[in-house]
Amino acid sequence: MKVLESREAFSREGKKRKGVPVPQGKAPTRLLRHVCSDHFPKNANRFFARHDFLLQSKPRNEMVALISPDLHEDDLQLPPRKRTRIDDSPTSSKTASPRIFAPFRALGLVTNHIPFVLQTRSFKGSTEGPRIHLLTCLGRSWAMWEGGKMTLLFVGPDEAEQISFMAVDGNNVWAAAGPDVVKYIRGKEIARLKNPLGSHLSFILVFGSQLLALTEDGNRMFVWDTGSEELQATITFEAGFTATSILHPATYLNKVLVASSEGALQLWNIRKQTRIHVFSPSSLLTLPANQQNIPAPAITALSQSPAIDVVGIGFASGEISVYDVRMDERLMRMSMQDGAIRALSFRTDNHAVLASGSSTGHIALWDLNNGGRLLHIIRGAHDGAVTAVEWVPGQPLLISSGEDNSVKQWVFDSPTAAPRLLKFRSGHHAPPHLIRYYGDDGKQLLTASRDRSLRCTSVVRDSRSFELSQGSLAKKATSLSIPIASLKLPPITALSYSSTRSKDWDDILTAHTDEGFARTWSMKDKKLGKHNFSVAPESKKAPATGAAKAVWVTACGNFGLVSSSTGVIYMYNMQSGARRKSFELGPYPSDASNQAQSAGSSRKKSERCVTGLASDALDRVVIAGTLDGTVNFFDFHTTKLEQTLVLPSAVVSLTLHSDSGLLAVICDDLIVRIIDIETRRVVRELGGFRGRVLDVTFSPDARWLLTTSLDSIIRTFDVPTGRLIDAFRTSSVATSITFSPTNDFLATSHVDSVGVYLWANRAQYADITFQGIAEDEVATMALPSVQGEAEDEALEALSSLTVQEKPTDVFITPAQLDDDLVTLTLLPRARWQTLLNLEVIQQRNKPKEPPKPPEQAPFFLPTLPGVETRFAIDQSKPEESKKETKRLQKTAASSESVFYKKLVAEDPDGIYEDFYNYLKAISPAAVDLEIRSLASLDSMRRFLTSLIQRLRSHRDFEAVQAFQAVFLRIHGDVLIANEELREELLTLQAVQKTESERLIDLLSSSLGTLGFVRDTM
C-alpha cells in the first residue's frame, strides 16, 4: 500500500532532507489537491520495529536533540528504552487468591454429631408411598438427601459459625448457627433471626407459626414469630435449671416440655409465658437410695409416642423412662448398659416398639407390649455415638445417624425378626491421612484413615463410593461382644497400586502400623486380597525383622515390593504370592560424608531403615531410599546394587513419576530434591518450607511438583525452572495430596476433617501466567464445600474457576509508547491496498459472461400428450411492480448502521478509539460501503472530525490515510459544492501537514542513525 508518495531523498554524506513544500491554497479544489499530496516514504516500513517509531539504538541525549532541538532532556518525558509492564488496575495489590487452583467440591461428608431431621411428604394419587427427605449437618452447611435412593439433592450455603441445630417446616429449612437462626428455601437464605443478647443458640423447635430457641448456657428461651420475624417473648429459667431440649406433646395447645441437664422436666405455656408443672428427677427415673446427694443424670433424649400424653425420656446414665405427663406417672423403665442414651424414637405402624441409640454406637429395640423387654440389639450399628434414630411414619423402616459420618436405614422384615441393613451412605469417621488417585481416568480415589479402613471415593458420584471389605467382622464382633473397630486392620502407613492387571488378580498393596508384612487388596472384588507379603527371612536362624515400612507395585502389575525398618527388601508375585527376589542394601558407604550419618562406616545393614520404594515403568531399576540419607539403585533382574546416591539429610519418602523418570525425595532438612533416575543425579532442590514436608505429588506432565507441609501451605513448583509459581494456605494442615491423572483436580485431605477436598486446576479452563511468587503473596483459602449431584449446580460451580484478575503480561507492548511518536496499526499492508483499489478488484473479478441454462431439462417436468416429446411449460406470470412503498422508504431512511451509530456516539474532542477499532475489524469492502453511505452533510462533517482527531492522537496513521483517500475520492464533488464543510477541510489540511512533517522528521533521524551504524560496522 502506498497512501502517500515520498518526495524526500536522503544523502549519506549530509543526511539533509530536500523537501517539497505544500502550498496552502484557499480554493476548495486546490485544498483537496494538496490534502491528497503524498508525504509517506516509500521504504519506511522496513525500518519500523513492530509498529512504533522508536529509535532504540540512539543514545538518550542524541534522541532528545533529534526529536526537538529546542527542548531540554528534563522537559520531555522520553519513552523508556525497555518495554514497560501494563497495569490496568489503578494500584497494584497482592494476590488475593491462588492463580492455579480454585475450591471446587468436598467428598465423603455425610453428617456430623448434629441429629438429622426426617421429613415425609405424601402426594395425592401417588402409588409409591410418601417421599422421604433427610436433612443432615455438614458443619457450617447442611445437606438435603432423598431417602429413597440416598442421593444428595442440594446443599445449603456456608455460614460463618458452626450449625448447632436444624429444623424443617414444609419447604423451609431452619438452622441455628451461632447467635442467628437462618431460614432457607431450596438452599437460598430467605430470613435471619438474631439473638438480641448475642449468645449462641443450641436448640430450635418450629412451633406452629412460632420458633422456639434455647441459648447455649440453657438459661433463656426465645420465641419468634416466623411470619413477622419479630421476637415475641423471652423466657428466663430459674437458677439450677439448664435447659437442653424442647418437645411439644401431641394435642397440647401452646405447651412444650423443656428438659434440663439436672434431670428435671418442666411444662411451659408459651403463650402465657408461665410454667405449669415441674417433673422432678425422682419421679422420672430411679435413684439409688444411698446416693441421694449425687446429682441426677442429665436428660439427653426426648420423644413423643403414638399414644397421647406419653413421652420417652432418655438419660445420660443409660436409663429410659416411658412417662405419662398427664398423670405424672412412669409407665416403664428400661436401661442400656453401654453408655448414655443419645436418641429415642417410637414405631408408628401399629407395633409398640421403642428404638434407642447409645453413645457407644449400639441401637436397642424394646417391646413395649411386654413391659419393655429387650427385643433386639444392634451392636456396633455405628462406629461412633448414635446421634439420632427415627422411624419412618407407617413403615417398618428405621433411620439412624452417628458420629461416624454415616446415615443408615434398617428394615424389619417381620415384627420379631432382627433388623436388616437396607441402604446407607457413609464416609470416613476419622480424618484420612493417605489419599491416592486410582486408575488413569481420574474418577476414583483410594483413601486410608486412622479409622482402620480403606475406602474408594468416587469423584463423579457419591453413591459409587464404598469401603473395601475386611471380611465378616460384624458376625465376629457380635459373637465375641466386642466393637467391630477392634477387629479391623491397623491403620495403613503406605499404599501402592497398579491397575494394569486389576481384572486378573489383586492390584493394591498396603503396609500397616507395626505389622511385619504387607497386605494385598482387590479393587474389582472390593475386598481384602488373598496374600500377605512378609518381610521376615525364610531362615528361622536369621535375626528378627521389623515392621513393613514401604511398598511398591510395579507398572506391569505382576510384582510387589516390600521393605522393612531393618533394611530388608523383598519382591513378591502379585498373582501367586510367592517370594521371588531379595535386594541387599549392604553397609553404609564408608567413603561418603553425610550429616545425617555420624557413624556411617559402623552402621550395619540390619539397622538401615528403608523409607521409600520405587521402580521405573520398564522394570529395569529398583530404587530404595533409606533413613540414613541414601538413595540406592538396584538392577531389577539381577538384584545387584548398581549405585548409591548420598544425600545431605535423611530420606523421609519417595515419589516417582514413571513417565518422565523424575523422583521426588522428601528430606528431613526441609528440602525436596528431584532426582533424574536416568542420570541418577539431583537436578532440582526445592526449599522455602517452614515446617516438615508431609507429602508431594507430580502433575501428569511432570511440569509441576506440589507439596504440603506443616506450615499449612500447599505449594506449586515449576520443575523446569525450579521456581515457586503458586501457594495458598488452608485453614488446617493438609496431610496428603494427589493430582488427578487427567490434570483437572487436586485432591487434599486435612488433619481435622473426614472429607476429601477437590481443587480445580484453573489452567484447564483459563489462560494463566506462571510467574514466580514471594512468600508474602500466599493467599488464605477456605476449604471447598459439598455440592449436589445436579448438573446445573456443577456447571455453576465452574464459574468460580475463571481467573478474576487479568494476568499481567510482561511482554505486552503499550498501545502507544509516547505521545510524540507516530503509531501504525498492526494490520497487514494488503488490507489498505485492497481498500484503495477496491473498484479495480471488483471489475477484475466480474464474470465475463452470464450463467448458461442447463442443457437438458429435469426429468420431472410435465409433458404434453402426443407423439413427440413436448414439455408443458407454464406461461410466465406478469412481473409485479417492484416499486418500493413509502413505508419501506421511511424505514430505510430511519435505519442506521453500526458504523454510523459508533461515529455519532464518539466524543468530538476524543480520539475515536471504538470507532476506529470497528473500522479495523470489518472488511475493506464493508469500509468502502460504509463510507459511500455517508449521504448527509452532517455525517460527512462527523467523519472529517474523526479523521482530524485521530491524526492528532498520532495513532493508526496509515489507516487514517487510507480512509481519507477513499472518502475524498468518493465525496470530492460534494465537498467542493458545499461551503459548509470548508472549515473542517482547512483544519484537516493543517493537521495533515503537521503530522506528515512529524513523521518525516522521525524517519529522517532514524535513517541517519541507521546509516551511521551501518557505515561504522
Image (cartoon, rainbow, N blue to C red):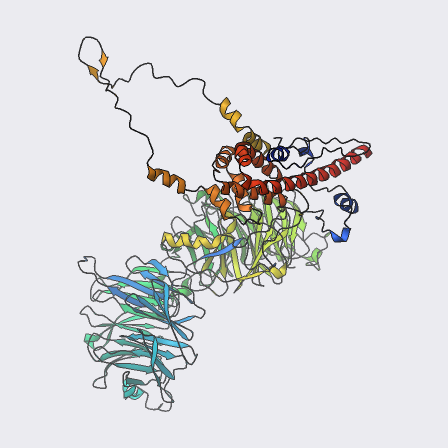
Residue 462 sits above or below residue 824 on the image: below
Q: Point out the image quarter for the C terminus.
A: top right
Image height of 998 relative to 284, above or below = above
User: Taking 887 as reference, is 714 left or right?
Assistant: right
Q: Is residue 641 above or below residue 218?
A: above
Image quarter where the N terminus lies is top right
Residue at point 77%, 36% (across, down): 1008
Residue 81 pos. (x, y %)? 72, 46
Left or right: residue 703 versus residue 401 is right
Kindly indicate the quadrant of the structure image that contains residue 855.
top left
In the rendered image, residue 772, in percent from the top left (x then y), is placed at 63, 53
How many badges with numbers are in the image? 0
The answer to whether 749 appears left or right of 479 in the picture is: right
The answer to whether residue 960 is visible is: yes
In front here: 498 or 997?
997
Does residue 518 appear in the picture of this structure? no
Q: Residue at x 22, y 64 (%)?
A: 395
* Residue 650 % position (x, y): 64, 57
Q: Position of residue 942 (x, y in %)?
A: 53, 44
User: Toward the viewer: 724 or 891?
Assistant: 891
Query: In which quarter of the view is residue 292 placed?
Result: bottom left
Pick whichever, 819 or 235, lies toward us: 819
